[in-house]
Image (cartoon, coloured by chain):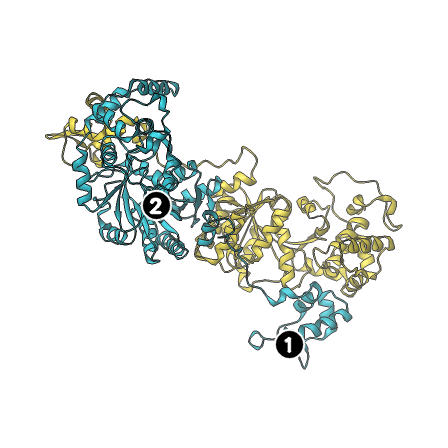
Chain colours: A cyan, B yellow
Amino acid sequence: MATPREADRAPSSSSPADVPTTASLPEESAPSSRATEAELLACVALMRMAEPGERVMGRLVRRYGAVAAADQARRGVLDPEFASAETKRARAAGRMPALDRLAASWAARYADPVRDLAEGREQGARLVVPGDPEWPTQLEDLGDERPYGLWLDGAVNLRFACLRSVAIVGARAATAYGAQVAAELASGLGDRRWTVISGGAYGIDAAAHRGALASGMPTVVVLACGTDVCYPTAHQDLFRVVRSQGVVISEVPMGSRPTRPRFLVRNRLIAALSRGTVVVQAAVRSGALNTAGHASELNRHLMAVPGPITLEVSEGCHDLIRQGRAVCVTSVQEITELVGTIGGDLALERRGPVHPRDALNDETRRVLEAVPSRVGTGPAAIAVSAGVDLTTTLSCLGRLAAAGFIDQSDRGWRLRREQDR
Amino acid sequence: MATPREADRAPSSSSPADVPTTASLPEESAPSSRATEAELLACVALMRMAEPGERVMGRLVRRYGAVAAADQARRGVLDPEFASAETKRARAAGRMPALDRLAASWAARYADPVRDLAEGREQGARLVVPGDPEWPTQLEDLGDERPYGLWLDGAVNLRFACLRSVAIVGARAATAYGAQVAAELASGLGDRRWTVISGGAYGIDAAAHRGALASGMPTVVVLACGTDVCYPTAHQDLFRVVRSQGVVISEVPMGSRPTRPRFLVRNRLIAALSRGTVVVQAAVRSGALNTAGHASELNRHLMAVPGPITLEVSEGCHDLIRQGRAVCVTSVQEITELVGTIGGDLALERRGPVHPRDALNDETRRVLEAVPSRVGTGPAAIAVSAGVDLTTTLSCLGRLAAAGFIDQSDRGWRLRREQDR
């Protein structure tokens, strides 16, 4: 089937001649056809030419399909109708339209997609593009910032793995407490058959991936560099295990180095792939809070784990909670209650231990409090001390003795020792 | 002036003959007269006869004044009109009326108030009763559970000390973290001229008192036993310092031992005296949460400090936050913002460090990201890597060099090292 899946969103009246104006396809809730090689090549070319999350490119692809969009970008010449709409849009937003420059930069970055695709496959990765069976359809929520395609390297089907998934993100400079919490939440989520998604960084990310792997469930590493680039270098072993039990993914071409802006745009994928994001430790200004922001914008559940107020990496979490942006979560159950199906994953309300004293009525409790612990005392003294009349006191004492709270000594009533009960 | 201050709430039509039916007094916002010796003696007798917070006694005192109420209680015979109203009230609430038994228990506990008063004064304490200049008028919020009187032992005027006050409460089994947080919040509040109120117990309470003392401000210990009883015994030195710099108070007679129910009713005083309560560490079922409940009921601000989710003593705080009952607070400023005057004590929003990169526009930032850190690179390669056209790249490079971000080597542009900036 050779239909560009993106074309279904384009009004057929404005479709250029080189894009088939097929009637709109049914909603792609369960896509079942593979992309053509031409489409794959177009997406690979787009990933090389445009920065991820570039909205103008996103709209170009949505309007003309990947193949035509890649062709326009390669030539550095955009359809005049599209160009004028974009120029209007930029002016309305108060920005200087710089469309020519943008198109020229796309053209300048063009590289042979045949070689790119072959190189990726040689590295053991597979390319998944919108409309593919393995494409996670929740990425459609990103709208104009949807990725052009994803490189996947791992044993697991990305789309299935993400159906029940939670993102756990946080500080690279995590403390032992933070790492422990991330690992335990992740393995607890795994035990409940949830997939954990994170960014593969030091600290919270790594702890979360490791916790998930320990539970035997897949985990998804979303990289800001090519799937063939190991960043951070020390995570070579971690990523190797993830590839065998989960999947390492990226929206940038093979060999791409991670840059600061790429980390930030990468974060939208972590938020969009999952049903909710848990921030474990985060300084006030951090990548994790950037992911949190994406989660909110995408109407995903945003959760934050509290921690010691004496740590700087707690501040971001506490701010999210204080501002009412994130729900304070302290256990796996509290997380699954939010991201799970209603009724299926309800957190139990925490209860303290039940004391046998709780069963006593008010007067009996007052009498019990008036019974001395060592030397025995008579009922009259107990009645006065308890502020309860003698008759009532006597019947209370009988009940308390029967329940094993007190016993009688030579000198009167006294508390029964704990070990005797 | 011999008017029973409580009489002003009693409808004069139903006042018994032995209580002067004075026209209602003006609101006691700034009481200036001392109670008569007869009133003091009546209150001392009430403190001996009735349990603190006993609502029936509270209503009796409100209706007839302390002197007449003490007289009825001592005789164990209540005014028939009052008794029938109370019986009706109990039936309406579905409780078995047990008024005779209650009155009998009051009579049984009667002790000579002259001796009680003298004994308290010998111990160095002073009795303060409703209407006294030192009576904290915010205790009126307790309604029927208002204390009959308070024993005070300390250098400081209770009413003034509590005008700007915060309660800090929490677990006896506090961790080092909890104790540190309680002490630091308390001393920080002291630095801002806030009085800290707590229960004098081990753990959070003691740390809070010590922190307050360290700031040089008064602190108020509210005991569940007589002010002459040192509970816990190990706090002899602490209470001695509090008496010299603050005040130790209690609503139970000299010599009274602390009992479990007394701890619970005592907690309402801690909540009522202060403008807000901060829970630092608390297990799910704990006295601190009981105080928290009182604070909510009294419409005082309720705050909780988060902590490691791995500690049991964090659970109570996190539950309060999760249920939306308490505001999550992490600093003195966040506390004073709530309990302070509007506008006078606003917490600053926390901000991360400002990076010089923030001043750069989008293109310039992309160019900066494309500049290598060690070996220099030419502008054309940078332009391609940044996805920015060459002309723009050149002008960006100039700006970045001027701002000190990059410099030129033999082989092209490279990042300037941090220490050179």
Q: Nearer the viewer, residue B15 or B239?
A: B15
- The image quadrant where one finds the N terminus of chain B is top right
Image location (x, y in percent) of residue B158? 63, 47
Give neighbour class at mark 2: few <14, some 14-19, many 20+ (Cα, 10 Å).
some
Provide the chain ID for the residue under circle 1: A
* Spot occupied by residue B247 in the image (x, y as percentages of width and height): 60, 52
Q: Which residue is mark 1?
A: A375
The count of marks equals 2
State which quarter of the image contains the C terminus of chain B.
top left
**Amino acid type, mark 2:** Arg
Residue A299 drawn above or below residue A168: above
Most distant residue in the bottom direction: A410
Q: Which residue carries the number 2 mark?
A: A159
- The residue closer to the viewer here, B242 or A1, is A1
From this viewpoint, which residue is outermost toward the left?
Answer: B410
Q: Which residue is at the front of the view, B266 or A15? A: A15
Q: Which mark is residue B182?
A: none
B388 sits to left or right of B110: left
Q: Position of residue A270 (x, y in %)?
A: 35, 42
The span from disc 1 to disc 2 (Cα, nearest Å) is 72 Å
* Mark 2 residue element: helix
From the viewer's side, name the closer residue of B229 and A99: A99
